[in-house]
Amino acid sequence: ISSRPNHNLSAPMSDSSKDTTRVYKFVRNLKYGCNPHQKFAAIYTLDPETWKNSEKDIADEAKNASKMPFKVLNGNPGYINLLDAMNAWQLVLELKAALNLPAAASFKHVSPAGAAVGMPIDETLAEVYDVDAKALTPLAAAYIRARHADPKSSFGDFVALSDKVDEQTAKILKREVSDGIIAPGYDEKALEILKGKKGGKYLVLEGDVTFKPPANEYREVYGLCFAQKRNDTIVTKKMFENVVTKNKDMPEAAVIDGVLATICAKYTQSNSVGFAKGGQMVGVGAGQQSRVDCVKLAGSKLRIWYLRQHPKVRGLKFKKGCKRVERLNAKLSYIDEADMTGPERKAWLQYFDSAPEPLTEQEKKEFLKGLAGVTLASDAFFPFRDNIDVASKYGVKYIAQPGGSNRDQAVTDACDEYGMVMAHHGIRVFHH
């Protein structure tokens, strides 16, 4: 892909009257595009030769931007694989930089199903997640927590990890249904394990932590080229100091969750919100036109995450030989057994020697009263108090959002009614 060059690699976006030429260098073909019938698919990098006679700062940026941000160590990448990888990779790098903890993301269809940092997993969650918490490295714990925000959505995920992959983390990944991974490096044994997944076809990418993307982004849609400054906003703990509610008590744990959920929203298809608790996303609401529907969607995922910890769910007795993924799916179905159709319930009962005692609505309601200390972050301001009213049903105590609505005061008043703590950080993070 080439045409006449000019020297406008990162021209200020205010300088919109200038023509721009970008020359791309072919790297490799991909399996196919978004769908198998889209046979042509490939990736390119910028060609640094275009700017070799430019001013030094432009030439230097072009040279760096022309590098590949990753190496393929195993497998044949697809178009959506790499869209997931590039978004997830940025998310975990930003999480690691902001919190100085190992970070993990589980992506599906260019949005995170879950994300987390490497903090300890308690005994109850270790049982729910079916792991030996004492045997987990911090990186393995980060991935387990990211995967189990919404394990149904994470089925066949693309994984991003902020740190070099160790053998224990690779063993955890080996047992999961996943399409690929990007990380800054791999221990020798870890790489051997991962290369053996999917009959040797598991996609393994090594991300380049030194890569610096161009300041501006370009994309084509229906024959038009769109350009914008890259969203290079850095989310930090300091952003959560502007607390606008009467209750000003936002502890460090809530700030960590606010950073996590805001960075997660930055790489989630808008509109989006996310619930976080204990350094783990526990509900992501992506791609809804109505913000309150995002809250409801994320809340439904949070509800299931929490009810998985109910003693009746944890105590289900399965037939001998029932596979781990079958047990997980059966537990998720059990939570809302009353909604099953007749044939659906018949298929579900095959995993048990006898029908489990139902988990009643009253039992669920009582158990959900224990859900507390949840942080909610939004990629843009809350336009109405209904978002807060819905959030109050899911144990939300802390809220992080940009602010800027002409109804900010009404939203703040709603938070005060529930005793919530809300920070306005002033940064919208729409992602499309």
Image: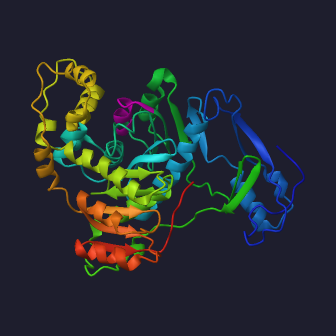
**Horizontal and vertical percent for residue 404?**
47, 76
Q: How is the image coloured?
A: rainbow
Residue 423 in which image quadrant: bottom left
Q: Front-most of 55 and 400? A: 400
- The quarter in which the C terminus is drawn is bottom right
- Give 372 or 61, whichever is nearer the viewer: 372
Residue 223 vertical placement versus 203 (above, below): below
Q: Give the vertical position of 412 relative to 227 (above or below).
A: below
Residue 191 showing in the rendered view:
yes
Prevailing SS of the magenta stretch: helix
Q: Residue furthest right?
A: 4
Outermost residue toward the front in this view: 342
Image quadrant containing the N terminus: top right
Q: Is residue 117 visible?
A: no
Is 43 within the magenta? no
Up-down: is 256 above or below 23?
A: below
Looking at the image, which residue is at 45% across and 31% down? 194
Q: Is residue 65 left or right of residue 248?
A: right
Question: Where is residue 95, by image quadrant?
Answer: bottom left
Image point (63%, 58%), residue name: 212
Give how far across and how far down residue 11 sits, in percent: 76, 67
Where 30 sits versus 246, above or below?
A: above
- Where residue 224 sits: x, y (%)? 76, 52
Q: Position of residue 52 (x, y in %)?
A: 83, 58
Q: What range of the chain is rendered magenta?
A: 169-178
Q: Which residue is painted at 26% across and 32% down in the image?
A: 328
